[in-house]
Amino acid sequence: MNILLYLIIIIMGAIIGFKDIIKPKLMDNIGRVQHYSLLFLLFIMGLKIGLDKNTIKSFGLIGFQAVLLAIFSIVFSIAAVKLVSAFVMKEKEEGQIQNDI
Amino acid sequence: MTFSILLAVGIGIVLGYALFPPETNNYIGYMIDFGLCLLLFFVGLDIGRQRNIFKKVKSMGLRVLLVPLMVAVGSISGAIAGGYILKLPLNEAGAVGAGFGWYSLSAIELSKHSPQLGSLAFITNVSREIIALIFIPLVAKYIGRLESIAPAGATAMDTTLPIISSATDGGVAVISFITGVILSFMVPILVPLMMAIRF
């Protein structure tokens, strides 16, 4: 697991973002770089799946079961988070008001 | 956004299957790691530029932990409901759902029981990741920002985090990372636990 590496990289980015050393114009360009590198990463992730002939073959056999299980997991997860989201986010807004005062 | 995500993943799958030689696989791991690190750095930039994020998340306190808890409950109960329809053993369906999108680990763990279950876990959780990539922007727009973390499961800390971050804001990105980390720690505990339960 690379949790620690990810955390370090995100914190490094956060420090640089927080210090405001990046000029707004460069930031606009970064937004574009961000968009295309995201699409590139997604392309590579797709490539990885497509290269794995076993995955593609098993998808033909058990794809229906797998997609149904995945969709049920996702829909139930969204519904479950929806039950608590107002409660979780409300605290956030109250905190905001306290900070503003 | 959803369309370009679908297109990028789709073209990748088709080209990977039909065009690229199998040796490409040797480099793919590095390319994914590099791309991911670059994007996570950008996520960090977004988080840092919104100065009051940590105060906000801190004010939410332990309530933040409700998000991974609900995603875990939803993923497992959803998979059990799906398994009931497909007439699968319910503990096995629950174990597949407890992979939370982390396909490599859940597949390895469940291959110990049977190769078929291992590949079901693999394909289900790969499908979950792809469906999450495509639908996160739509969930963020039409259902809610916090809810957009739910499809991601354990991948909320890495592969789907850049999408969640760009579809929402730095505050949700922080919650997303926390959610992904907690769910990732739960996978190796909950998958065997589900297999041990007799319904």
Image: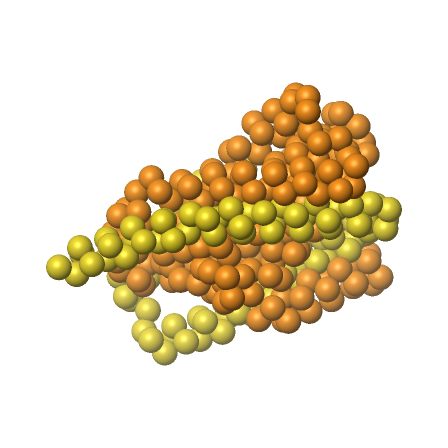
* Percent position of residue B73, x then y: 54, 38
Q: Nearer the viewer, residue A23 or A7?
A: A7
When asked about the image quadrant of residue A101, the answer is bottom left
Q: Nearer the viewer, residue B190 or B31?
A: B190
* Percent position of residue B117, x then y: 77, 33
Outermost residue toward the bottom in this view: A25
Outermost residue toward the left in this view: A101
| Whether residue A54 is visible | no
Q: How many marks?
A: 0
Q: Which chain is yellow?
A: A
From the viewer's perspective, is residue B190 above or below residue A86? above
Q: Residue at x 60, y 51 (%)?
A: A75
* Percent position of residue B135, x then y: 60, 61
* The colour assigned to chain B within the rendered structure: orange
From the viewer's perspective, is residue B128 above or below residue B134? above
| Whether residue B78 is visible | yes
Q: Residue at x 61, y 38 (%)?
A: B77
* Percent position of residue B54, x then y: 28, 51
- Which colour scheme appears in the figure? by chain
From the viewer's perspective, is residue A65 above or below residue B165? above
Q: Quadrant of the N terminus of chain B?
A: bottom right
